[in-house]
Image (cartoon, rainbow, N blue to C red):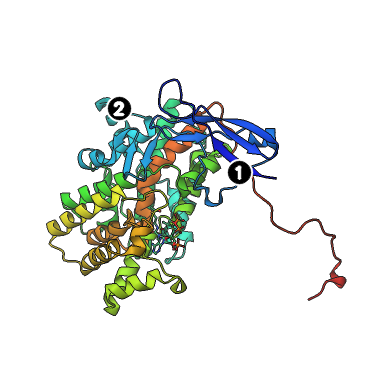
Amino acid sequence: MSEKITLNNRTTTDGKGFPEKAQLILGEKSMELPVVVGTENEPAVDISKLRAQTGYITLDDGYSNTGSCKSAITFIDGEKGVLRYRGVPIEELAEKSTFIETAMLLIFGGLPTQPHLAEFRRILTDNEFLHEDLRHHFEGFPPNAPPMAILSAMINAMGCFQQKWLLPEEDNHFMEAAGRLMSKVRTIAAASYKKSIGQPWIYPRYDLPYVANFLHMMFSQPYRPYEPDPAVVKALDQILILHADHEQNCSTSTVRMVGSSQANLYASVAAGVCALWGPLHGGANVAVIEMLEQIHASGEKVENVIAKVKDKDSKTRLMGFGHRVYKNFDPRAKILKAACDKVLNKLGIHDPLLDIAKQLEETALRDEYFVSRKLYPNVDFYSGIILRAIGIPANMFTVIFSIGRIPGWIANWREVHADPEARIYRPRQVYVGPTQRPYVPMEQRNR
Ligand code: ACO
């Protein structure tokens, strides 16, 4: 049976130049599939009736060609290196906005007015402490517990303490729940760090804004307050802005998937933290620093490293390089490279790892292997060097990423819940296991 898919060439009435329908021919059968075009002219073939009408499903391992939802939150054009939150370019936000304002843009759909911002700040301040019983949870973790495991467990546990906020369907409760989560995540993150180094945890300070307060909880000691350099606060604020959302990546899709079962905000975000933990996703910034440290310690030539990562038998990759969506450059990496130079200069730090990173980038971008595969530095390539300069240890890098990504997860969870037509996410599969066979009693089994 011959099977082919053809897109016909009719244009839409508004002249965008897309066909109205795609025609799918499956042997003798044919079916018209509607073409959906997003506000940034991204065309998609709507296959939602495909199985019902033909018995076929589509197969897209890793989902590279699958739109799992319509979303109005973040737009990425991977070919052009474009990233916009609710329409606002990431470059403008990194330069002019703050993390809290950007979080509100993502969560509530627009930049806040002064009173709206003040109200959200009040919620953040009112919720920066942890319930004493929640605090005692920390005692159950061993000192070397991975901070991402603590973060995920504690976010889930938060749900037990705030059950009335579990399904914040209406706007007032939603704002309160979003602010609580953003605020407490920062306290949990700092407390998990303090636990890991055996220091008493530091209470938040109501007079400090979000990022400065986090740095205070991370680095102050009961007898020695920490006063962050404004350049450090700005750099961390920028890192959080750049990580705040990235459309349907692994962790955000996880949050939407879990949320689609009507699971509450805390449970859904806790699952997102686990997804982010992996080294191919949020864990890559740790892997980058480990790779740079190893190159520095061994004195290995950059050319050798590049040769190794090109060799498939070596099973190593150039960490912080490549991206599923960006095939030209990652706009976040560009901003972070400049921020890296700026903050290290301001703090008077010369980090040999930055020199190695720049040499790796230069060498890779001249190499046919990387050019032909469209592999460029991603957001993780330079962020770790900034975090190191701030004094944040590598095992906390992915936690910082999580703090940044919380607004995106909240916005996506909300979008799933606010959609009156939302259904539980339930992909299908093409089964390739054994066909029917009988149950074999124990005594008749070989082995
Ligand atoms: N180093 C060397 N080769 C690479 C790299 C890399 N970092 N990334 C991809 N390639 C090669 C692959 O080996 C493959 O080569 P082939 O076509 O000869 O087989 C080709 O480029 C395509 O790679 P895929 O794995 O198919 O690309 P995919 O889109 O699935 O993966 C990913 C993207 C996971 C980011 C990948 O580039 C990677 O592993 N990078 C290193 C880890 C990393 O930095 N992750 C952070 C991503 S950003 C984030 O999550 C915030």
| Relative to 348, 168 lies left or right | right
**347, 116: nearer the viewer:** 347
Q: Is residue 299 above or below residue 60?
A: below
When asked about the image quadrant of residue 145, the answer is bottom left
Quarter of the image where ligand 1 sits: bottom left
The residue under label 1 is which amino acid type?
Thr
Whole-number angstrom distance, CA of label 2 to CA of label 1: 44 Å
- Comparing 268 with 51, the one in front is 51
User: To which residue does mark 2 refer?
Assistant: 116
- Dot 1 alpha-carbon crowd within 10 angstroms: few under 14, some 14 to 19, many 20 or more: few
Q: Position of residue 18 (x, y in %)?
A: 45, 30
Q: Secondary structure at mark 1?
A: loop
- 415 vs 25, left or right, is left
Q: Mark 1 = which residue?
A: 58
On-image quarter of the N terminus: top right
From where the camera sits, is residue 338 visible? yes
The three-letter code of the residue at mark 2 reads His
Residue at left 46%, top 65%? 142
In the image, 174 versus 304, the foreground residue is: 304
